[in-house]
Image (cartoon, rainbow, N blue to C red):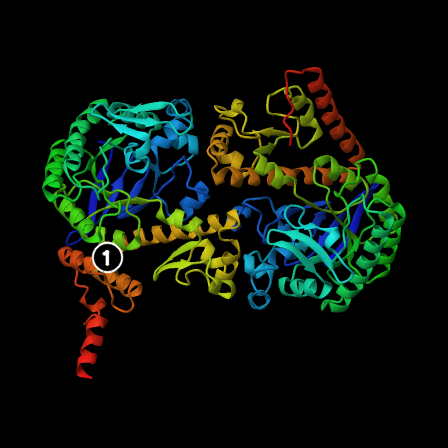
Amino acid sequence: MRFTVTRSCGGARAGALYAGNWTSPLETPALLLSTRKGLPAFISRDLLASLPLPDSLLLHSSPLHFFECPPPHTLQNVGGLHQMLGLHDHIFVASPRDSVECLPESDGANKLGASFETPSGRRHVNPAKYMELISSLKPNVWASLADEVPAWVPEKRNKTSVDRTIRWLDDCLALDLASGSSILGSCLGAASKEERKRCATEVAKRNVSGFWIGGFGLGESMEERPSLLKAVTDCLPEQKLRMISGFDLPEEVLQGIAAGIDLFDSTYIYHLTLGGFALTFPLDNEERGAFDSQLSDIGCDGTKINLRATTYRKDTSAIVSNCGCFTCQNHTRAYINHLLNVHEMLAQILLEIHNTHHYLGFFRSIREAIKCNSFDLFHRRFIKGRRAHLTSTIAAPECQVVPA
Amino acid sequence: MALRFEVIGRFNRARAAQLTLPHFVCQTPLFMPVGTQGTIKGLTNNQLEDIGCQIILGNTYHLALRPGAELIDDLGGLHKFMNWKRALLTDSGGFQMVSLLHLADITEKGVTFQSPVDGKPMLLTPEESIQIQNKIGADIIMALDDVVKTTITGPRIEEAMYRTLRWIDRCIAAHKKPDVQNLFGIVQGGLDPVLRDICVRGLVERNLPGYAIGGLAGGEDKDSFWRVVAQCTAALPEDKPRYVMGVGYPLDIVVCSALGADMYDCVFPTRTARFGTALVPEGVLKLKHKAMASDERPIDPTCSCMVCKNYTRAYIHCLVTKDAMGSQLLSYHNLAYMMRLSKDLHMSIVEGRFPEFVRNFLQVQFPKGDVPEWVCNAMEVAGIDISACCAPFPSSTQDFAAELAA
């Protein structure tokens, strides 16, 4: 894996990531599609091919999904994630937590290893086991094992978490056959700026190819994030890749990009899809003006629509009229409303395709904005649009905001 | 009549035909996957086209409840609603008399159901069934029949058969779109050859575009099953499609095709997929089994579907019954298997090698030569020599002989 920063715009930056079989670089900031056992929750290989390239090549995978099966020797024989999934050109980025069903459980961690709640119960993972999974899965890029703790733990526990994470990074490096060429050093520190700085400084001293910033989305407030992120990025070298977990929503992504993050592993699409939501927000600022005027639709909060709402029962339009995704090209809101109504799996398939397509489009317009030096404006307008909508719904009490 | 049925190949009673429907030109014999509520569970339309699906079945009963026939009609019919470009078939809602009997009360007027959505009683008359099916707009619609379980006996079977004949005239009279939708009649009469004969004659007199053999695949013994199919296919007109309802086991489809049937439907391939079972030429493969965890082969090495080309049994083992993707991938493979079976039946008849195909099919399914007796009997009637697939002596007899010798 190779990474270069191609442009900076305020705190935000654009970069080029070279990895896998793909010959041309992948542009950052970019979204990693979250997967379950290597495939997006509802999008099979043939449908994945309908999503835009190269944007949809970046996949996030949690090695813990393969803790139970297939057995390590089978994984080894098959040749790793790419072969097992038939996704030879895709780029797998691995980190332990998937933020959906494999979550760090700080109470269960000890000096030997980290602990996670998984679908098969609580799992204890030490660096040796983690590296066994990594070496058989062969992801293109992966984060070292981390002892993630929530924002509310006492200072002492947070210090221990940082100490362990640095030690485990050394363990992972010692066991890494590729000697650091695809490893992201994990940077923790929870809600303490000092610990964030200490961890980032120590990790930056190691032979790593980039950084995974963890410990977010675990109870810290939105307001304290910019200063925590700054504490981390200040200690990291400019030219290396930065990935973050726990920044899911569009607003959070924009916050992360403003702080100079390159890769995002988001569970937003998954949660929207399960809830029956489809993303509809305009992807560039020109569309926004026209869009704002029709925000008072029921089942619409300005960024997404709830296709379960009865208002879509006879709506024969596509989710987004000019959207080029498989779902919008082939199916109506009325059909998806029916599928949700009768609990048919196709609803989730179609929604995950659309939401993925749309969110990839969001990242693309962010990259465009950075390229034209207008990211700050893009960011401000997006937030303003959301606020304007929220205040207008408060002013009009008959219009309900559908909770996500 | 809105169809054309051209037989293009034969072997004794078996036939391969081109069935031209308003939305698609189909090759028979063919299997129709069941898309109960306007979707095949877990597959997109383009995936169904990729694997060669020609007709999808929709359930009138379910569609009438949700989203409702009015809504489907307002939005331009089921083809447009689900954006399926190929052919569709809707059942009459009659099968739910068997499957949801505790909710149904059957009289001469029609069937009264308790709506499972809101608990209100819903009357389904022959007229209403056809009216709803006219609104849904499938290429083939089914007459409302009085379905009884084949396993029951007595006067109820006779009553149901005669009622089915009386209802067919009400269905024909109610059918408003004979130029774009084909109404198929359904042969009833349980396992009684006399009743079946009366029903077939009664329906043939009405000169319908096609005929279905109903009331089977409901738990009757296999010997009765094939005899009813053989009797009906022999008596139905040569130039009309014959549809055996509810049949979906690959072996049953091969036997029925040998006896001259053309169309089949069943939830089995997709339902069994959701429970973690794959269809393979040898029979079935249970992917939940522990042995699959480290099996690095594809589900079926002879299959060229997207799933078999890309995934190992070991990987599918991790998914089945835990992740939605397990259902999706196995349903895809199982339907691809059924489509390949349909195509193989069609091509082998057209190319004059149907007996070889049947023998090969049976040899792979029964490598020990233990072909069930009912299959042997049916094949004799079909005029297909399968002696090469059957063990010369049942193994138990051999053991007995060995014991005697000792």
Q: Position of residue A343 (x, y in %)?
A: 48, 36
- Position in image of residue A359 (x %, y %): 65, 39
Residue under the point 32% across and 54% down = B341
Q: Residue shown at 65%/43% (left/top)?
A: A267
Relative depth, front residue between B87 and A352: A352
Numbered circles on residues, count: 1
Residue B365 or residue B118, whichever sits in front: B118
Question: Going 80% across and 34% down the picture, which residue do you hit?
Answer: A376
Picture quadrant of residue B133: top left
Amino acid type, label 1:
Glu
Q: Residue furthest right?
A: A194
Residue B145 visible to an observer of this rendering: yes
Q: Residue at x 38, y 39 (%)?
A: B35
For label 1, count other residues whose C-alpha is less than 10 Å away and answer few (under 14), some (14-19) or many (20+).
few
Q: Which residue is mark 1?
A: B351
**Position of residue A16 in the picture relative to residue B326 (left or right):** right
The quarter of the displayed image where residue A220 is located: top right
Whether residue A300 is situated above or below residue A356 in the rendered picture: above
Closer to the camera in the image, B376 or A11: B376
Residue A96 visible in the picture: no
